[in-house]
Image (tube, rainbow, N blue to C red):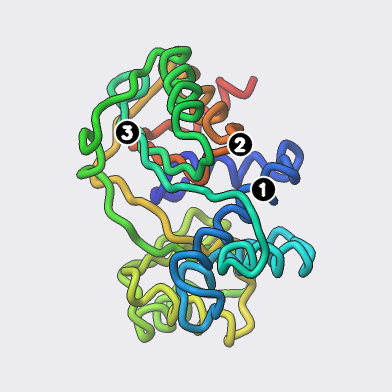
Amino acid sequence: MSGHNKWSTIKHKKGAADAKRGKIFSKIIKEITIAARMGGGDADGNPRLRTALNAARTANMPKDNIEKAIKRGTGEIEGVNYEEITYEGYGPGGVAVLVEALTDNKNRTVAEIRHIFDKYNGNLGETGCVNWIFQKKGVVEIPTQGLTEDEVMELALENGAQDVKTDGDTFEIMADLADFEPVRKAIEEKGWKIELAEITMIPQNTIKLDGKKAEQMLKMMDALDDHEDLQMAYANFDISEEEMIKLSA
């Protein structure tokens, strides 16, 4: 499995069968709204909005939904005032967990997030307790079919990428934030299919989980991902392919 974010990889491999389209749209709309509020409605001059719009197109979100979300953000039409908030804590086995949320009710959200941590043998911590473990990076994933590692590596490095990894089915291209958009654009102009392009948090180390702790960790991340206010959850755990097969049986 690729290593930039174990939960992101697991979700991707689980496939569309358990994707919740309505929740996906809701999360993207929130992100578009706050990106437009913070940086304006022009995607060319607002990298965060540009990334959110790419996610919207990948999810086949209707153009009307996108335009309304931008206008809510810029204040052209009225809408809910979302606030960004980050939660930090620990999962089973001492795994570091970082949660990014957009909410219109901080008290409700923190209570519900705390309940999820408690339910799966974790605990919500103080601000700053695990943030230092993660680094913000840009990641682009493309299918390996029809491509060689050398040609992908050449294009990626020419446009500022830091690293290219593969798990056999996918090339994972990693870049600093300043180089993320040039890398993504170069891949797009080359005509290669982009399966994923996102700003993510990369753990500097990982904790290997198996058995009950692995099962609890996956259930915790699934519950967090299902929460309507959550935008992204990161954790520094690793689970072997063999263990994943056992847990899926």
Viewer-closest of 245 and 6: 6
* Residue at x-position 38% and y-position 34%: 238
Disc 1 marks a residue whose amino acid type is: Ser
Residue behind mark 3: 88
Residue 144 seen: no
Q: Quadrant of residue 75?
A: bottom right
> What distance separates the C-alpha of mark 3 from that of mark 2?
18 Å
Label 2: state its secondary structure: loop
* Residue at x-position 40% and y-position 76%: 153
Of labels 1 and 3, earlier in sequence is 1
Disc 3 marks a residue whose amino acid type is: Glu
Q: In this rendering, would 60 be left or right of 165?
A: right
> What distance separates the C-alpha of mark 1 from that of mark 3?
23 Å
Residue 139 seen: yes
Q: In this rendering, would 248 be left or right of 48?
A: right
Residue behind mark 1: 26
- Local packing at callout 3 (Cα closer than 10 Å; few below 14, some 14-19, many 20+) is many
Callout 2–callout 1 Cβ contact below 8 Å:
yes
- In the picture, which quadrant includes the C terminus? top right
